[in-house]
């Protein structure tokens, strides 16, 4: 019961302290709002960049060319060999016969169609192909080598040079995004902590009086912890609202894409709520941490 009374009194005192020291509380909240908005923007941008690169990686195709004289039995055997390769997406194995390829090319280009129409039956020089997708783009080189070893497979193409460069660029983008988010979170923690430290340092006389009358360290520290928690929560409200409503508005106004369908935005429901939760946790935890550190180190409680 005593602990419950202390907690209740600490919460009450923390609310009173916020209003009593409104200017300093406002400074802490303002600092929290600005830095958490930057963190929210970096998280949303990072998530969208990662989603975009993952989507491009998943849509990358590998084409395995099969000898023109391969029989149906040999083609079925090749399919089974392809399915036995671990890195192949077995749900996305598409076989295209040379006649189907001829028909598709003719439908897209009238000039080529007129040329291909002159081919007699059996003169089609095109090759049968298997169009594939890999599960892990980083293992695409080893997967292509395995495909080349399959009997009757003459060539495997996946844009080797471009893909290797793309993998390196995507890895760099993901690493930079993660570093940026972590750096902003650390900067946020530093700024909020120091702002709250200044707030509490200005009240050192109040704390010294409490010590002189014999108040225990834990009782002195608890109202400040609750105050830091509340300041962090209050400072998180605007960033959370901007994240939820701002990103939803941006997504709808852009039609879910940026510039073209190649750059699709993540649906708001998949990102805004988890980002808001992260913002709330950062604000509240950093607020409590800043208050605790200020009371313990600066005022030597």
Image (cartoon, grey):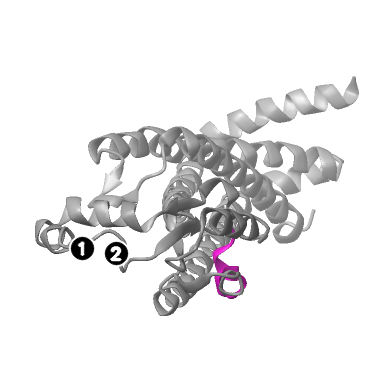
Would you identify the image quadrant in which residue 91 lies?
top right
- Mainly helix, strand or loop, the magenta region? helix
Q: Position of residue 192 (x, y in %)?
A: 55, 53
Tell me if 218 is positioned left or right of 16 in this view.
right
Q: Position of residue 147 (x, y in %)?
A: 58, 69
Q: Residue at x 66, y 45 (%)?
A: 285
- Residue at label 2? 124
- Residue at label 1? 119
Q: Position of residue 222 (x, y in %)?
A: 76, 38
Give the number of callouts.
2
Start and end of the magenta stretch?
135-146
Q: Is residue 253 above or below residue 180?
A: above
In the image, farthest residue toward the bottom: 161
The residue lying toward the viewer, choosing from 53 and 185, is 53
For disc 2, the neighbor class at 10 Å (few under 14, some 14 to 19, many from 20) is some
Q: Secondary structure at mark 2?
A: loop
Q: Of callouts 1 and 2, which one flags the residue occurring earlier in the amino acid sequence?
A: 1
């Amino acid at each position: 019961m005593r602990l419950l009374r202390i907690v209740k009194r600490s919460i009450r005192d923390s609310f009173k302290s916020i209003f009593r020291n409104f200017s300093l509380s406002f400074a802490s909240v303002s600092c929290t709002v600005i830095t958490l908005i930057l963190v929210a923007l970096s998280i949303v941008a990072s998530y969208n960049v990662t989603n975009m690169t993952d989507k491009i990686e998943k849509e990358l195709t590998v084409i395995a060319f099969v000898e023109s004289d391969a029989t149906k039995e040999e083609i079925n055997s090749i399919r089974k060999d392809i399915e036995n390769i671990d890195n192949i997406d077995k749900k996305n194995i598409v076989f295209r016969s040379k006649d189907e390829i001829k028909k598709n090319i003719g439908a897209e280009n009238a000039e080529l169609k007129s040329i291909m129409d002159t081919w007699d039956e059996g003169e089609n020089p095109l090759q049968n192909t298997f169009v594939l997708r890999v599960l892990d783009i980083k293992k695409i080189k080893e997967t292509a080598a395995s495909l080349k070893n399959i009997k009757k497979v003459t060539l495997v193409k996946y844009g080797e040079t471009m893909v290797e460069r793309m993998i390196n660029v995507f890895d760099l983008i993901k690493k930079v995004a993660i570093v940026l988010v972590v750096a902003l979170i650390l900067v946020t923690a530093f700024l909020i902590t120091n702002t709250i430290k200044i707030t509490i340092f200005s009240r050192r006389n109040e704390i010294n009086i409490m010590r002189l009358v014999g108040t225990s360290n834990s009782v002195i520290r608890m109202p400040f912890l609750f105050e830091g928690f509340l300041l962090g929560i209050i400072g998180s409200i605007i960033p959370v609202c901007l994240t939820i409503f701002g990103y939803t508005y941006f997504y709808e106004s852009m039609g879910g894409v940026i510039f073209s369908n190649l750059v699709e935005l993540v649906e708001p429901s998949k990102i805004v709520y988890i980002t808001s939760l992260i913002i709330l946790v950062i604000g509240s935890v950093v607020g409590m941490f800043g208050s605790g550190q200020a009371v313990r180190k600066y005022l030597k409680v």
